[in-house]
Amino acid sequence: MPAPARDACPGLLALHPARDGHVTRIRLPGGYVTGPSWRALAALARDLGDRHLDLTARGNVQLRGLRAGDAAELTRRAALAGLLPSAAHDRARNIMASPLAGLGGRKPLRSLAAELDAALLGDPVFAALPGRFLFSLDDGTGGAGLAGCDIGLRWAADGLDLVIAGRCAGVRAGVSDAVAVVTAAARAAIAQGVGSTVTRIADLADAGAGVAAATGGALGAPAAGRDARIPLGSGGALPGQSGTSSITMVVGAPLGRLTGGQALLIADLLQPDEVIRLGIAGRIAIPLSAGSSAAAPRSIGRAADLARLAASGLLVADDDQRAGVTACSGAACHRSVADVRSAAGPLAGHPRTHWAGCARQCGLPPDAEPVIAVDADRFLIPGEVRARPLTALAGAS
């Protein structure tokens, strides 16, 4: 009999021990966060953690430096802020969405993500979904992890195409029945062993063929997802509520980490009734509020807000040498053999790199190449079979 699947992903109720304290991961379905929830996250990091927000590769947030004795207070405050709608489903709500969906004339995904989240929360069966299980919602522009998802939907001309284990399933759903199709696939995945013997659909003995068949489809070609990080800077003008216009800014958290001050600045700029949108590689889309300098003439507002964001240390332009660099938690993790957060930097010939402290390559964005530590000073870079010392890499950057 196969060994049961081990779900080692942290959650709000399942803290993960690390060298720098304990880690919690807070699920943010769709990568969407309201202003009040974002401020609540910053307050939790300030009061109970190390004062930083870590952005994950799936649009969630981690808090680090937590004390085990503060677990109950963390849970209480997170629940009050709406960040823990169901204790049973703490780790079962990984939903990624294209971060610019619904902006600038793009097809919307917010209501679909909310409907899917409500369906998961409303059924105790789905509490069995592992922390690594991923739902992807793609508006056709990418950025939702579709190629690596367990179950996904991608907008097509007359509906949404179903994706199972990163492969096209040959099923097209209408908007009204899309969530029912996804939840049927999730039920089939659980019935066939996901959550009990494996953590991902692709790891099933038939690679997910039975899950696809349960929805009336069949596994086909890999889903071609454009899972690249979204461009930094202005995301374009959007129609305002009163005939004016506002702007969406896209910024990057250096190495995927935000200070408390950066987080609050982002919240201050957010357009009312909108959400912060988290993407891969620490990208954050912010529909600006009418109270920000976006209320000024468009070119002036854009420049002023970008200047404020840049002054805080955030990435605001793709030509910033840090824009292509990400890293895992490095020395803070028990598995890491090197302090990759201190070592991480640009490499000549490799425009997007992810510095990893061990071979697990945690947090690797789908558009990046891994630079893997083999010990405290040597790293294996893409395309080479022999590790090089950090001093040699610095000279090649």
Image (spheres, rainbow, N blue to C red):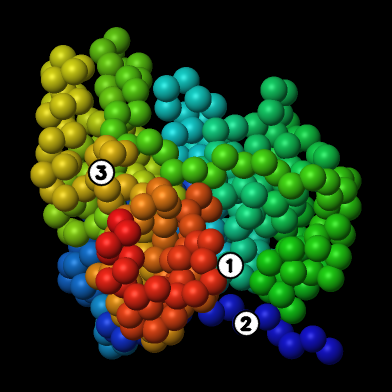
Disc 1 marks which residue? Answer: 132
Number of residues whose C-alpha sits closer than 10 Å to that of mark 1, classed few (under 14), some (14–19) or many (20 or more):
some
Residue shown at 65%/32% (left/top)?
A: 155
**Tag 1 near tag 3, CB within 8 Å:** no
Disc 3 marks which residue? Answer: 320
- The Cα–Cα distance between marks 2 and 1, rounded to whole angstroms, is 10 Å
- The Cα–Cα distance between marks 2 and 3, rounded to whole angstroms, is 40 Å
State the image quarter where residue 340 is shown: bottom left
Task: Name the front one of labels 1 and 3.
Answer: 3
Q: Earlier in the sequence, mark 2 or mark 3?
A: 2
The quadrant of the image that shows the C terminus is bottom left
Could you say which disc has been placed on residue 6 in the image? 2
Q: Earlier in the sequence, mark 2 or mark 1?
A: 2
- The Cα–Cα distance between marks 1 and 3, rounded to whole angstroms, is 32 Å
User: What element does badge 2 sit on?
Assistant: loop
Horizontal and vertical percent position of residue 24: 38, 73
- Name the residue type under label 3: Asp
